[in-house]
Image (spheres, rainbow, N blue to C red):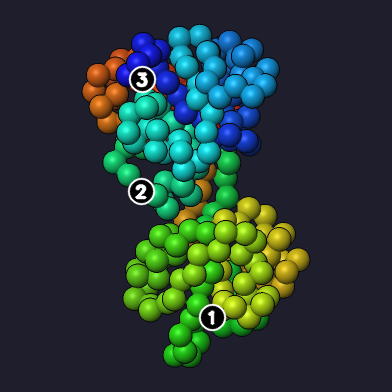
Amino acid sequence: MSSQKIRIALTKGRLEKQTVALFETIGFNCAQLNSKGRRLILPMDDYEVVLAKPADVLTYVEHGACDVGVVGKDTILEMGGTHYEMLDLGFGRCRFALAGPKGVDFFHGFHERVVATKYPNVAKHFFERKGMDVRIVKIEGSVELAPLLAFAHAIVDIVETGGTLRENGLEVIEEIAPISARVIVNKASMKLRRAAIEELLNNMRLAAQVTG
């Protein structure tokens, strides 16, 4: 590590704001984070905070550029990795779900099923567990479009309230996995800096219980 401070990678956006609020509950000085401008690396007491996209948080922790990361379980399930998953912070809750046109039985019949998703690995593992042969197509934008265009029979996506599905004539067929913000730790960092990282994790755990 080039920095003596423990580096914490945060997922930019909503999870970032919720994690900063958690840090404030702990008592950390988050002034720099709250007035960050365009800066991507910011000081916070004895830590350095790095702001990144979800997949990059996982990559930076995986390869040791950051010691600790806060990222959604969705990213962990899709990308995998060899980090330690240490803590469920309890916020950012939603779920992976299989969804399709309302009133249509996705599992009926023997025709080839096409499923559109931003998360092909999650979808692949889900259907493998069911022993189903499904063609999975990766979509970058609004996956709800695929069934509406008769391009796919169903989608695998993140569902929070289900409002977007309902507005587009879709419904949840089956829930796949719960999602929330998780704390991950680089394996080497956990060995070399165990005491400091465990202190941080304990503080985050207690703060999550207070705010949860």
Q: Which residue is mark 3?
A: 197
Tell me the kind of residue under disc 1: Phe
Q: Nearer the viewer, residue 103 or 61?
A: 61
Q: Which residue is mark 1?
A: 106
Residue at image position (76%, 66%) is: 167
Tell me the kind of residue under disc 2: Gly
Residue at image position (52%, 20%) is: 41
Are there few (<14), some (14-19), or many (20+) residues within 10 Å of tag 3? some
- Secondary structure at badge 3 equals helix
Name the disc covering residue 96, or none: none
Mark 3 or mark 2: which comes first in sequence?
A: 2
Are there few (<14), some (14-19), or many (20+) residues within 10 Å of tag 2? some
Name the disc covering residue 80, or none: 2
Task: Give the alpha-carbon distance from disc 2 to disc 1, as whole Å.
Answer: 28 Å
Which corner quadrant holds the C terminus? top right
Query: In terms of image quadrants, where is residue 128?
Result: bottom left
- Secondary structure at badge 2 equals loop
Location of residue 110 with respect to 82 vertically, above or below: below
Q: Is residue 118 visible?
A: yes
- Secondary structure at badge 1 equals loop
- The reply to whether discs 2 and 1 touch (Cβ–Cβ < 8 Å) is no
Residue 7 lies, in percent from the top left, at: 42, 21
Residue at image position (42%, 77%) is: 134
Task: Give the alpha-carbon distance from disc 1 to disc 3, as whole Å.
Answer: 46 Å
Tell me the kind of residue under disc 3: Ile
